[in-house]
């Protein structure tokens, strides 16, 4: 097995415990794994941003904007967006190197079990791409991440217009028309899955659609908090 | 200059001699019968091959559930930086009319003169092209002035309407070559192609390119010159020689340039399978500086404790010609940053401006320019500056010369940065180590050997 990022061969440690309990082989070598920054220490309990305060100003703003009750219960992210991660994401999403997503098979599943194991009967819903973007890229990175989870995935949402949000200001983005529509009905709680949480606007648009259609609770699970 | 009627259309010229993905060709152009399709990935039971880059390593193929054809199939991970090659989409090469390239009467506008050694190499090169030799190697020591040796050969090629490519593994070398070649052939359109370059079309008669960029060319060059043929990643990545070969016409003459040929070329020369010219003297007629080895027992302990070895600081501040700038090579980026801090703390401004540079440094080009105009006095660098760059007056230090990134070729190239200019044709070269390696010993041997062949007895 070669590391999916640097293509060096991965040497497996062999000791008593690996002989007795063979672990699944990882797709990422030790050195590359160490270059990724897992969020540790104190963070905002609501959005996973590294922060000394338990609920950050952005999250307070969202709460206020939604009349005291945010549309999502919380967001959980695993990694911060350092340069190594930016390079990986660029190659994975924009160059379309699909297999790079498997770098996260292990960590995305493992952190899920730690953070969400108490949630019963929840289903995973990936944030969709627009038709146009899907044509270009050939795959949806959020669906790929959702497939690593030990729960059922439903492609419940579709995106009616495109993703080009980055040039707008936050207020423009928030007040812009909600790009998501619901494709079916929903009674379970939902974990929305995406690759990056940046301002949280996209994910709240999606959550909004779900809540308005009767979804009891929406959590979000993202690989990266940028 | 006459082009045939169809190809006068500038829209089509850029597709000639190319091998492209479907999405790189607009629909209207694609349906014009100028292209031939070939399968993109060849799949046999235990063997895959990408037809764009030649990759056949299984770990560099991925499987993708394709949203376009609704099947799971292969894509090539090796050449994905140039756009994704998908198994379900063919590649297209230009098979429409070929363009006859213009013949120039007197394209060479350079008026300098060559030394005897350069002249000999230049003559051999022209002859190799005239007689349509398949390959010729010019083995010229660092600072021999190899760019000037090429001019007559390129001139001959342009006189008879050849399409010419000068390729090199390193983008810095392309950037450095472009103004010099353009200056020597002022009337001739020349494009420089490298990741992030402004010229991205590749429709000129003369192309300067990184070997990577040749992945998009198909049987189009009559003369291929490969500069720094021994440099990383060319000798390391089999897809690059593959791309270079595919970009050549079957009748192409290939010229290799190197100061430090690797085993494969040395063997071919030894077995008389590769005609070559050896240029053992620098253009200014002075010998190559021979590196001095300096043992530092505490080197690794010092570096670990983020200290700079004290006797090395003494050496640096007491150099025989303190006005020379200092080029300090280190094995890693981390160490580069640390050494800058150390030297700043220790010397307290006495050495002038100290800075570092490495491959991912966004200000890399600017810093090298600042060093060249002496706005930076000490530049701490990784191996990215080991070749292709020329500074007028420097001393050179390699810190931790025993590290595996410093192989024999790298050390010879690094030593070759000193004494490049007529006005200051020598320079100190110091290898600091805590245990001699074969690479160091062989590098010094080969430098001495070249000086001997150049007629210097040391
Ligand atoms: Zn790795
Ligand atoms: Zn927050
Ligand atoms: Zn390929
Ligand atoms: Zn397909």
Image (cartoon, coloured by chain):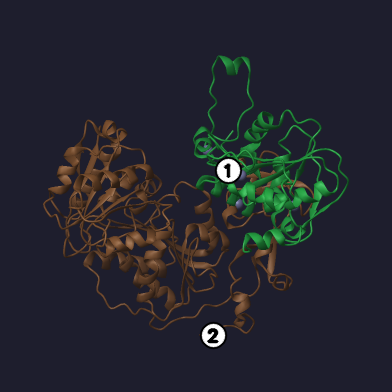
Chain colours: A green, B brown
Percent from the top left, x then y, of residue B409?
33, 47
Task: Name the residue rendered at 50%, 39% in the picture.
Answer: A35
Residue sitting nearer the eye, A172 or B27: A172
Question: What is the secondary structure assignment of the residue under circle 1?
Answer: loop
Q: Disc 2 sits on a residue from what chain?
A: B
Tell me if B372 is positioned left or right of A138 in this view: left
Instruction: Give x and y (percent) for residue B222.
Output: 49, 68
The answer to which image quadrant residue B63 occupies is: top right
Between B251 and B16, which is closer to the camera in this rendering? B16
How many numbered marks are there?
2
Q: Is residue B87 visible?
A: no
Whether residues under marks 2 and 1 lie with C-beta atoms below 8 angstroms apart, the answer is no
Q: Which residue is mark 2?
A: B2
Residue B101, x across and y down, in percent:
52, 77
Q: Is residue A112 visible?
A: yes
| Mark 1 CB near ligand 2 (8 Å cut) | yes
Side of A152 where B446 appears, left or right? left
Mark 2 neighbour density, 10 Å: few (under 14) some (14–19) many (20 or more): few
Relative depth, front residue between B229 and B370: B370
Residue A29 falls left or right of residue B188: right
In this picture, is B201 found above or below B172? below
Q: Choose between B398 and A42: the one closer to the eye.
A: A42
Q: Give the residue at mark 1.
A: A49
Which chain does the residue under circle 1 lie in? A
x%, y% of residue B201?
A: 55, 70
Give the residue displayed 21% in from the left and 34% down from the top. Answer: B296
Cα distance between the residues tagged 2 and 1: 64 Å
Give the residue furthest to the right: A185
- What kind of element bears circle 2? loop
Foreground label between 2 and 1: 1
- Residue at the location (58% across, 38% down)? A54
Instruction: Say few, some or many: other residues with alpha carbon within 10 Å of mark 1 (under 14 / 14 to 19 / 20 or more).
Output: many
């Amino acid at each position: 097995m070669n590391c999916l990022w640097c293509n060096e061969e991965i040497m497996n440690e062999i000791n008593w415990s690996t002989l007795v309990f063979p672990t699944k082989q990882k797709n990422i070598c030790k050195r590359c794994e160490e270059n990724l920054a897992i969020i540790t220490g104190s963070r905002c309990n609501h959005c996973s941003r590294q922060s000394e305060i338990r609920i950050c100003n952005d999250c307070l703003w969202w709460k206020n904007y939604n009349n005291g009750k945010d549309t999502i219960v919380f967001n959980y992210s695993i990694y911060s967006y350092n340069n190594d991660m930016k390079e990986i994401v660029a190659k994975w999403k924009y160059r379309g190197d699909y297999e790079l997503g498997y770098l996260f098979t292990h960590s995305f599943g493992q952190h899920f079990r730690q953070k969400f194991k108490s949630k019963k009967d929840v289903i995973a819903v990936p944030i969709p791409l627009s038709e146009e973007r899907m044509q270009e890229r050939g795959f949806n990175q959020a669906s790929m991440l959702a497939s690593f989870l030990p729960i059922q995935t439903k492609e419940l949402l579709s995106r009616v217009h495109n993703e080009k949000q980055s040039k707008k200001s936050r207020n423009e983005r928030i007040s812009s028309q909600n790009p998501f529509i619901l494709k079916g009905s929903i009674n379970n709680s939902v974990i929305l899955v995406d690759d990056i949480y940046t301002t949280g606007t996209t994910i709240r648009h999606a959550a909004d659609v779900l809540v308005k259609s009767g979804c009891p609770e929406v959590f979000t699970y993202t690989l990266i908090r940028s | 200059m006459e082009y045939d009627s169809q190809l006068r259309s500038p829209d089509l010229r850029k597709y000639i001699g190319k091998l492209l993905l479907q999405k790189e060709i607009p629909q209207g152009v694609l349906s014009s019968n100028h292209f031939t399709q070939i399968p993109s990935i060849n799949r046999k039971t235990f063997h895959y091959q990408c037809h764009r880059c030649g990759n056949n390593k299984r770990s560099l193929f991925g499987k993708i559930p394709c949203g376009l054809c609704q099947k799971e199939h292969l894509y090539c991970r090796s050449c994905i930086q140039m756009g994704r090659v998908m198994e379900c989409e063919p590649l297209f090469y230009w098979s429409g009319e070929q363009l006859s390239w213009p013949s120039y009467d007197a394209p060479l506008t350079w008026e300098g003169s060559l030394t005897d050694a350069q002249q000999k190499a230049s003559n051999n090169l022209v002859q190799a092209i005239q007689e349509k030799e398949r390959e010729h190697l010019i083995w010229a020591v660092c600072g021999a002035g190899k760019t000037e040796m090429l001019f007559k050969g390129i001139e001959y090629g342009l006189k008879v309407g050849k399409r010419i490519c000068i390729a090199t593994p390193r983008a810095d070398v392309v950037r450095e070559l472009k103004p010099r070649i353009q200056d020597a052939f002022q009337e001739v359109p020349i494009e420089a192609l490298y990741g992030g370059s402004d010229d991205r079309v590749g429709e000129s008669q003369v192309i300067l390119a990184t070997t990577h960029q040749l992945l998009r060319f198909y049987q189009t060059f009559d003369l291929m010159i490969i500069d720094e043929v021994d440099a990383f990643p060319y000798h390391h990545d089999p897809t690059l020689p593959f791309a270079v070969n595919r970009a050549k016409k079957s009748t192409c003459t290939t010229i290799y340039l190197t100061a430090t040929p690797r085993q494969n070329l040395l063997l071919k020369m030894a077995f008389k399978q590769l005609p070559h010219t050896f240029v053992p003297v620098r253009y200014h007629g002075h010998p190559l500086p021979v590196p001095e080895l300096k043992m530092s027992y505490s080197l690794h302990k010092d570096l670990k404790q983020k200290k700079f070895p004290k006797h090395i600081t003494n050496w640096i501040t007491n150099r025989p010609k303190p006005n020379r700038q200092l080029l300090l090579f280190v094995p890693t980026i981390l160490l580069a940053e640390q050494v800058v801090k150390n030297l700043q703390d220790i010397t307290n401004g006495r050495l002038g401006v100290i800075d570092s540079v490495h491959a991912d440094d966004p200000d890399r080009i600017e810093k090298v320019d600042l060093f060249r105009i002496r706005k930076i006095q000490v530049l701490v660098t990784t191996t990215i500056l080991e070749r292709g760059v020329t500074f007028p007056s420097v001393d050179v230090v390699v810190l931790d010369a025993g590290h595996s990134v410093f192989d024999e070729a790298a050390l010879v190239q690094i030593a070759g940065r000193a004494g490049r200019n007529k006005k200051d044709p020598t320079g100190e070269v110091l290898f600091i180590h805590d245990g001699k390696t074969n690479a160091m010993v062989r590098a010094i041997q080969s430098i001495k050997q070249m000086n001997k062949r150049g007629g210097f007895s040391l």
